[in-house]
Image (cartoon, coloured by chain):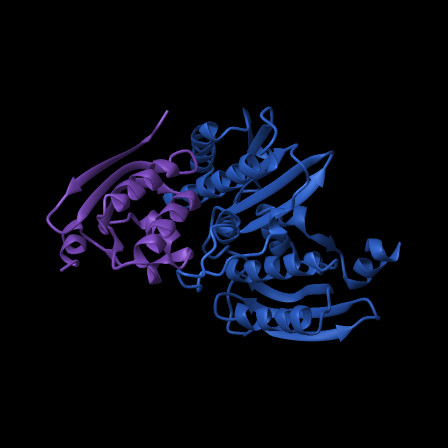
């Protein structure tokens, strides 16, 4: 039983992934698959909107780090929008706030790709 | 331990969300705030994920047992027990959050989070079971012990015999002064490799949660090196706090330094 849902929206320059639910060791691979799918389509500017993610464990962090590594080999980037305080705390603990560009709103994250 | 609750489940990833719910409910009832509850869930999730993915990697019939409870008035406890092969997660090399993207490894972050998010983490292998005990303090801010006065902290040291260093603490150990005490422990444990310490509280009038944290950290490092931090000369008010937050179950506590030396197992 999955408790994660991912909605993908193709914008002009950016692929927007809106995630909701719980990202843990049971669901992280769904997030990884979604990110890989988008990257394989050749879309390399991605915004991951985490506003509706109420929980994220290290399994989720592993997926976003892997995706960013892949994108950074080319000219792409994965940027994060609206993490909750709890998710932000986990990102900071792992030092990922220094590695990812994190925005307070979806709009700012999308607009950051000019 | 009060409000003891048990949950036993098959070691499969799909059971982790309900194990998290179980822990979250117990943590909330124990009085942890939303952030503390989240930390407990995440720590239990990470620990169970590791047990399932590594400990029981080749065993589809593994079981995990969770026990939660409250020690004293201010410590929420979770014990995670499993019968996969013995593995002490606390000895696993910690990843470094300063490392840049290219050099990042995927592993070790779960254990890192457990250590960062919990106040005390302890591993034992007992009766062919891995037992990981997580403790989270419920009252995080200033445990009220006695009354703060204007004295600052005092620290002195006496080398008792070749095995023991006695550290006498005095005054008030709070968020302003605990770093001085921490510096003394760091010097003795990390620098001088003195792993058998007797800490005398005879002259301590007050200790806050930050002072208690310094003590736990010294205790943990001494234990990791085969030593111990023994506690002596606790006044009743401070003894009460030790008992309240469950320190009496972690630390060996003695009437005075002489009793500590006489009763310590190393001398028997």
Q: Is residue A11 visible?
A: yes
The color chain A is rendered in: purple
Which residue sits at x=65%, y=54%? Answer: B236
Q: Nearer the viewer, residue B67 or B32?
A: B67
Q: Nearer the viewer, residue A37 or A47?
A: A37
The color chain B is rendered in: blue
Specify the quadrant of the image occupied by residue B201. Answer: bottom right
Residue B144, horizontal then vertical, whole percent? 50, 56
Residue B216, horizontal then vertical, whole percent? 60, 57
Specify the quadrant of the image occupied by residue B31. Answer: top left
Residue B61, horizontal then vertical, whole percent? 60, 24
B127 lies left or right of A95: right
B6 lies left or right of A42: right
Relative vertical location of residue B50 with respect to residue B262 in this rendering, above or below: above
Relative vertical location of residue B107 with respect to residue B261 in this rendering, above or below: above
Which residue sits at x=15%, y=55%? Answer: A108
């Amino acid at each position: 039983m999955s408790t994660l849902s991912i909605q993908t929206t193709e914008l002009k320059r950016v692929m927007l992934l809106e995630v909701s639910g719980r990202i843990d060791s049971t669901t992280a691979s769904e997030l990884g698959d979604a990110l890989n799918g988008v990257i394989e389509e050749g879309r390399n500017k991605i915004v991951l909107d985490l506003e509706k993610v109420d929980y994220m464990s290290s399994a989720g962090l592993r997926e976003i780090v892997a995706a960013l590594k892949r994108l950074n080999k080319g000219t792409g980037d994965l940027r994060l929008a609206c993490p909750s305080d709890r998710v932000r705390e986990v990102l900071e603990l792992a030092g990922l706030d220094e590695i990812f560009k994190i925005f307070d709103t979806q709009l700012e994250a999308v607009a950051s790709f000019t | 331990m009060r409000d003891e609750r048990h949950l036993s489940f098959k070691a499969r990833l799909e059971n982790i969300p309900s194990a998290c719910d179980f822990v979250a409910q117990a943590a909330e009832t124990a009085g942890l705030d939303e952030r503390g509850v989240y930390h407990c869930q995440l720590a239990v999730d990470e620990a169970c994920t590791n047990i399932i993915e590594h400990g029981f990697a080749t065993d589809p019939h593994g079981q995990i047992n969770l026990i939660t409870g409250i020690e004293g008035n201010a410590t929420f406890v979770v014990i995670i027990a499993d019968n996969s092969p013995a593995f002490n997660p606390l000895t696993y090399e910690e990843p470094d959050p300063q490392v840049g993207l290219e050099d990042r490894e995927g592993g070790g972050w779960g254990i890192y989070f457990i250590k960062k998010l919990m106040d005390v983490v302890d591993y034992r292998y007992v009766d062919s079971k891995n037992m990981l005990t997580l403790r989270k303090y419920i009252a995080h801010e200033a445990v009220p012990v006695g009354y703060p006065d204007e004295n600052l902290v005092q620290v002195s040291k006496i080398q008792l015999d070749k095995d023991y260093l006695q550290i006498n603490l005095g005054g008030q150990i709070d968020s302003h002064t605990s770093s001085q005490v921490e510096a003394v422990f760091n010097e003795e444990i990390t620098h001088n490799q003195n792993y058998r310490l007797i800490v005398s509280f005879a002259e301590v009038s007050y200790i806050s949660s930050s002072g208690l944290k310094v003590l736990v950290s010294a205790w943990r490092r001494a234990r990791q090196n085969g030593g111990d931090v023994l506690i002596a000369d606790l006044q009743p008010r401070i003894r009460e706090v030790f008992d309240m937050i469950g320190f009496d179950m972690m630390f060996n506590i003695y009437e005075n330094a002489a009793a500590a030396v006489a009763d310590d197992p190393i001398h028997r």
